[in-house]
Image: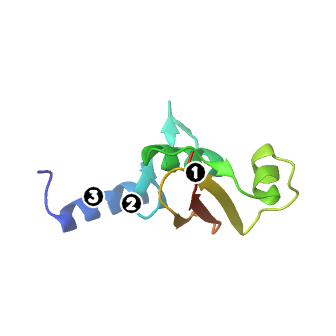
Amino acid sequence: NCGNYESIRSAIVHLCNKKKLLRVCQGVYVKPERGGIMIKPTNYQIIKDLDRRNGGAPIPKDEETKKYIEGTLDYEPKKLCFYTNCSTRQIKLPDGIIVKFYHRDK
């Protein structure tokens, strides 16, 4: 109802170029500005919101992921792994980190 694919895509690209939207990953965008202040969500906030949108709740799968969330990891990992009650999938965050969700029954 809002227009065809190309016009919507063009509008989203325009908003991203003007820094009104931030592209998180394919099909996922956030509004990074609140009260005139640019606020970029943390990777873990993005991960929680993505999984919650699909009805899940991410649980760290390995020790490296757990330490990264706690803030005790000295480096930026290349891959983060989580258990979820949603489908198994993989996404790539803007800073290049691969996030893998593994299905796990409750």
Expressed as whole percent of the image width and height from the top left, the position of residue 94 reads 57, 63
Sequence order check, earlier mark of 2 and 3: 3
Q: State how far apart marks 2 and 3 are (Cα).
A: 14 Å
Q: CA distance from mark 2 to mark 1?
A: 14 Å
Considering the image in quadrants, where does the C terminus appear? Answer: top right
Using the rendered image of the protein, determine whether residue 42 is visible from the camera's viewpoint: no
Q: Which residue is the extreme one toward the front?
A: 105
Classify residue 7 as left or right of residue 66.
Answer: left
Mark closer to the chain start, 3 or 1: 3
93 vs 42: above or below: below
Residue position for label 1: 47
Query: Which of the two marks, 2 or 1, is nearer to us in this view?
Result: 1
Q: Secondary structure at mark 1?
A: helix
- Tag 2, which secondary structure? loop
Answer with mark 2 or mark 1, whichever residue precedes in sequence.
2
Image coordinates of residue 14 in percent, x first then y, are 34, 59
Secondary structure beneath dot 3 equals helix
Asked whether residue 28 appears in the rendered view, the answer is yes
Q: Name, please, the residue furthest toward the top.
A: 35
| Residue at position x 38%, y 60% in the image | 27
Residue 20: where, in percent of width, then height? 42, 48
Q: What residue is disc 2 on?
A: 27
Q: Nearer the viewer, residue 56 or 16?
A: 56
The residue at which mark 3 appears reads as 11
69 or 84: nearer the eye? 84
Q: The residue under label 3 is which amino acid type?
A: Ala
